[in-house]
Amino acid sequence: MNRLLGEYEGMFMEKKWQLPRRTFLKGLGTAVALPLLEAMVPGVSLTAAVAGASKATPKRMAFIYVPNGANMADWTPKEVGNNFELPYILEPLKSVQQDLMVLSGLAHSKGWANGDGAGDHARASATFLTGCQARKTQGADIHVGVSVDQIAAGKIGQQTRFASLELGCDRGKQTGNCDSGYSCAYSFNIAWKTPSTPLPPEVNPRQVFDRLFSGVLPSEKTANRALRDRYNKSILDFALDDAKRLQSKLGYTDRRKLDEYLTAVRELENRIEHSEKFVASLPPNARPNGIPKDYQEHARLMYDLLTLALQTDSTRVATFIMAHDGSNRNYPSIGVSEGHHDLSHHGNDDAKKQKIAKINRFHATQFAYFIQKLKSIPEGEGTLLDNCMIIYGSGIGDGNRHNHDDLPVLLAGKGGNTITPGRHVKFPKNTPMTNLYLSMLERTGVKIDRLGDSTGRLENLA
């Protein structure tokens, strides 16, 4: 994109036209959604557009799941309120501490056995966004509840290209027994469209990228991908003419913003292609095609894709499973060769607990990368993060105890200035986490009386 635009050209121009929010740069099989531009905001001038931008920005919500609980002594701040120090696990979030809340005391009562015996990992993930008891079965008669993300998607999803987006880093099974008689569908999904219909996460970055930026018709997508592969072209090459036409109509600020955005899309596409080439060089079946071998690179690609989806208002609702509950992944890059699940049964062994804390900190580091990215993107009078509500947490507290109370939970973002972050809030013991979800839904304009085991809306967020 042309970076030699005149710095002051068009800065004080009266806005003669308004760009629809649902504008795409189009080419063969290409539909590149745009971020919020000043030209999309109703108003007489660009100055007025800036002042009114916050009213035009939507609220988004996303839910990030991490497995096997946490070493809670290294997770929970000692101080309550806005003057608290981040403990070891959460230290990577120091630069965004004022943009998040640590929420202690939240619980999922339906994560407990309640007469169903073993299977806490399956129940943890199945209950995390539903607040409902999962039917213990390894057959086709699975049943749990509709998840909060899908309740939101059902109400506001028609306003975006995708009602919701489901991402993950684990390619999971949807049938069979994965945890003490519980179907694998419970272990590998947190999004449930109906009580018996899970929405499996997409784990391949290329598939997510093509879904976000390719045309609507399958035939167009196929033709676009074939041409790109044949001539080694970027997806943006097919939309270049459209981009040039649009830039000629925009003021300086919007042209710079569009240029930065398209550069970010191209860089992400290049990173995906680089990962694919590396995977192609591995022995057959070493890794599924298109998924980076390096776990951190995989996670960050997915976070980048999620950022672009939220930035372009392609969706306002998303879920992301860093790893399924019960995951026994090891982490040699941080010096942990043992499996995560095995270590979570630490038996109060200090050495094992320290390794669990290192894994928890690694996950928090990737989350910090995501939150910093959201914060770096201007939107309206604030940032993209200011208009988001991002939940990060697990359905288990201490992996050794398999408890479902006092869960490790973070809430990042201001929800369109309806939430006051920068605090550690401790709620009464066994406060339903679903109360938090009711409060989040209300902030997006979705009002329901109950979700799972909820008892009311969560107070003390504003």
Image (spheres, grey):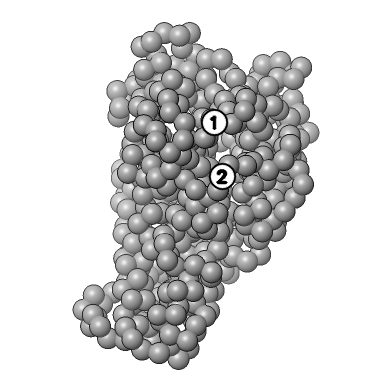
Disc 1: CA contacts within 10 A as few (<14), some (14-19) or many (>=20):
some
In front of the other: 288 or 105: 105
Whether residue 276 appears in this view of the structure is: no
Q: Amino acid at mark 2?
A: Leu
Residue appearing at x 76%, y 17% in the figure: 115
In front of the other: 233 or 326: 326
Quadrant in which the N terminus is drawn: bottom left
Instruction: Please indicate whether residue 50 sits to the left or right of residue 138 in the image.
Output: left
Residue appearing at x 74%, y 20% in the figure: 114
Whether residue 47 appears in this view of the structure is: yes
- Above-or-below relation of 141 to 219: above
Instruction: Please indicate whether residue 187 sits to the left or right of residue 133 in the image.
Output: left
Image location of residue 28, percent across then percent down: 46, 75
Residue appearing at x 74%, y 36% in the figure: 455
In what element is the residue under mark 2?
Answer: loop
Residue appearing at x 59%, y 31% in the figure: 427
Disc 2: CA contacts within 10 A as few (<14), some (14-19) or many (>=20):
some
Image location of residue 8, percent across then percent down: 25, 83
Mark earlier in primary sequence (2, 1): 1
Q: Are marks 2 and 1 in contact (CB under 8 Å)?
A: no
Residue under label 2, please give it.
Answer: 461
Image location of residue 331, percent across then percent down: 36, 27
- Above-or-below relation of 409 to 197: above
Instruction: Please indicate whether residue 304 sits to the left or right of residue 198 in the image.
Output: left
Residue under label 1, please give it.
Answer: 426
State the CA–CA distance, disc 2 to disc 1: 11 Å
Q: Amino acid at mark 1?
A: Lys
In what element is the residue under mark 1?
Answer: strand
Tell how many labels: 2
Image location of residue 307, percent across then percent down: 44, 55
